[in-house]
Image: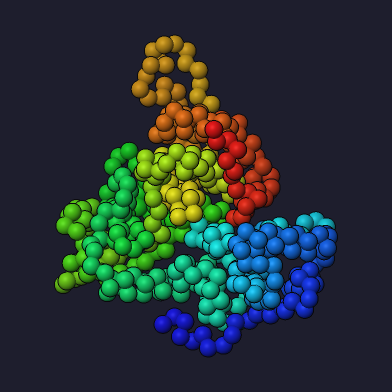
Amino acid sequence: DPLAGAGKRPETRLHFNRGSFEMLVEELLQGARLHCRWVDFEQSVRHVVQSVYAHLDNAGLGRQVRTIELLRPVFFQSTRAYLVGRLETDQGATPLVLALQHLENGLAIDAVMLDENDISVVFGFTRSYFHVDLERVVEAVVFLRRLLPRKPLSEIFTVLGRAKQGKTERYRELVRHLDRSHDLFAHAPGERGLVMVCFTLPSLDLVFKLIRDRFPPVKNVLRQDVLDKYKFVFRHDRAGRLVDAQEFKRVRLPRARFSPELLAELADETAETVHVDGDDLIFDHMYVERRMVPLNLFLREADREAADRAVLDYGQAIRDLACSNIFAGDLLLKNFGVTRHGRVIFYDYDELCQVTDCRFREVPVADNEEDEMRGEAWFYVADNDVFPETFINFLAFDDAQRDLFMRAHGDVLTADYWRRLAARIKAGEVLEVLPYRPRRLGLSLLP
C-alpha cells in the first residue's frame, strides 16, 4: 500500500473562523509567509471572500465557514504559486486553491478555485510537475486525495514531481486491475498510427504505445527521433496541452489477456520490442498515457454544443502549444484527444517541433495554370518550411465547424501569426498559459 506510511498529519496550518471570515482570510494570507509585499492586500482579501461566498451560495453549503486547513508548503508551477487547502462550513467541505501572481509591484490573487474539476486541471496529467518542498510526500498525497478523490494516486505522486514513485504506483494500479478484471487488451479507439501501435484495456483508462519496428516511407523519422521527441516533451512545459507519457521498460503482461488481432499485429509490427516468455509477453519498451477520446471520433458522436466547444478548444490548444514554443507538426484531428473535462490535448509527438525552429511561409503564387494544378509543390520546400494557410485542408470539420473555427482562430492559418509569435519567443518574452478560468474560452462565438 503506497499510503501505508501515512501515519502523521500532513504539514498543514488550521485557521479557525473567530467571528469574521475576512479576518480568517487575512490570517491565512499573512500566515503563508511569502516574503513579498502585496500590491493591494485588502483587495486580495476581498477577492477571496467574494469568490468563496459565491461558490458556497451556488453549492448550497451556506456561508458559515468554520475552518480552512492549508498545506504549509507553497506549490510552484511555471509563473504561478499556489496555496492548497480545504474549507469547511457547517454544511460540508470544499477544496480551496489560491493562485498567486508575482507582479512588478508585488503579489496578487490571480484566481480562487473551489471546484474539484477546476483543481483537477491544475493538478492534471497535462501540466508540468510542481516544485514543492514536502517533508513527507505520502501525507501530502493523502491530503490531495481528499480534494481530488477521482484522481489516481499515481498521477498525484507524479504531478508532485515524484515521477519514479508515480510510475511504480501506475504499474501497481495496472496489476491490481488485471487481477479483478477479465476483458482483453485490444487496439485503442481511433485510426491506426503509422509510427506507434496503440492498445488499451477497455475497462481501464490507459493507453499503451509501442514504437513500430518499421515506418512507412511517408514518415521521414527514425526510432531515435521518436524517443528524442518524447524526452523533449518530458522536459518541456506541457502548457496543459500535452499528455504526460510515462516510459516503461521490461514490462511483463499475461499473453492470455490480449485479443488475437492485437497479438497478430504485435508479432508483425513490434517483434523487436515484444517477446514471448512462457505465458507472458515481455515489452522491452513502451509509453503509458491516460486514455482520451480521439477528437475526430468525439466530433462525430457529440451533440452540437459539445462539438462546438471542442472545435474552439482545438484552436486554443494550438495557440497554447505555440505560446510554449511548440508546433504540433501534424494537426490532424485524430492526433488530438478530449479529456473528461472537455479539454483538447495533443498526444502524437513524432512530428512535434519548436516554433522557433520552423520557417513559416505563404504559399507562392503560381506563375501558370500548369504549376497550380500540380499534385505536389512546384516550388522548393525545406524540411522546416511550414505553410499555415494549408492547415484547413486537412481538418475534417463540417461546414458549420469550419466557419466557427475560422471566426475564432482564423489567424493561426496565417504565416504572419506564427512569425510574430516566434519573434516574441526569441526576444525572451514569457507567454503564459494558465490552467484556470481567466484563460478559458467562453462560448461567445457560438451561434
* Quarter of the image where the C terminus is located: top right
Residue in front for this viewpoint, 198 or 117:
117
Q: Quadrant of the N terminus?
A: bottom left
218 on left or right of 121: left
Q: Residue at x 48, y 50 (%)?
A: 342
> In the rendered view, does 427 fall on the left or right side of 137?
right
Residue depicted at x 69% and y 47%:
429
Instruction: Kindly identify the residue that appears in the image at 60 percent across and 48 percent down.
Output: 440
Look at the image and tell me whether residue 286 can be seen: no
Question: Residue 411 location in percent, x, y?
Answer: 58, 32
Horizontal side of 189 relative to 25 (left or right) equals: left
Q: In this orientation, which residue lies closer to the viewer: 286 or 143?
A: 143
**In the figure, 447 relative to 431: above or below?**
above
Residue 427: image quadrant is top right
The colour style of the image is: rainbow
The percent coordinates of residue 359 (x first, y second) are 54, 35
Q: Vertical placement of 329 versus 147: above or below?
A: above
Residue 207: where, in percent of width, then height? 35, 58
Farthest top residue?
Answer: 368
Front-lying residue, 354 or 127: 127
Residue occupying image coordinates x 47% and y 33%: 401
